[in-house]
Amino acid sequence: VQVVESGGGLVQAGASLRLSCAAPGNTFTVNAMGWYRQAPGKQRELVARITFGGGSPNYADSVKGRFTISRNNAKNTIYLQMNSLKPEDTAVYYCNAQGRNDYTGDDFGSWGQGTQVTVSS
């Protein structure tokens, strides 16, 4: 399953960015999608995750109140609205999609190629 991200860039502290992630296709069912990030020298960490069957999204404590994740089930797409960006938000942001192949029943977990977000002070 292909996962395609877009929307990264270079902004100043306090600015906003919106990331998009899509898992196009109709041979599988997406159950959840999420955003992770990895800064230089650090491990990849969860930023926000949302399930497609309902329920509240999960957020890292460091982004609560500033970032909002949303979804479009019909398009297998999620968005990450990032407000009040800080230099410590600088990282490569990766999208992950989890689901099941409708024909084989196999579960999948796919990653996008990543998009760079750089926040200058």
Image (cartoon, rainbow, N blue to C red):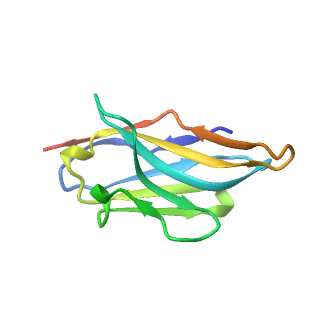
Q: Quadrant of the N terminus?
A: top right
Q: Residue at x 53, y 60 (%)?
A: 50
Q: Residue furthest left?
A: 121
Is residue 86 found left or right of 111 in the rendered image? left
Against 7, residue 60 (above or below) is: below
Number of numbered tags placed on the structure image:
0
Depicted 10 relative to depicted 56: above or below = above
Q: In terms of image quadrants, where is residue 58?
A: bottom left
Quadrant in the picture for the C terminus: top left
The structure residue drawn at horizontal position 63% and vertical position 48%, both measured from the top left corner, is: 98
> What residue appears at the point 23 percent right and 55 percent down from the top-left corner?
15
Q: Looking at the image, which is closer to me, 118 or 33?
A: 33
- The residue shown at (50%, 70%) is 56
The spot of residue 18 in percent (x, y) is 39, 54
Query: Residue lying farthest bottom?
Result: 55
Q: Horizontal and vertical percent for residue 70?
A: 49, 63
Left or right: 33, with 101 as reference point: left
Q: Is residue 33 visible?
A: yes
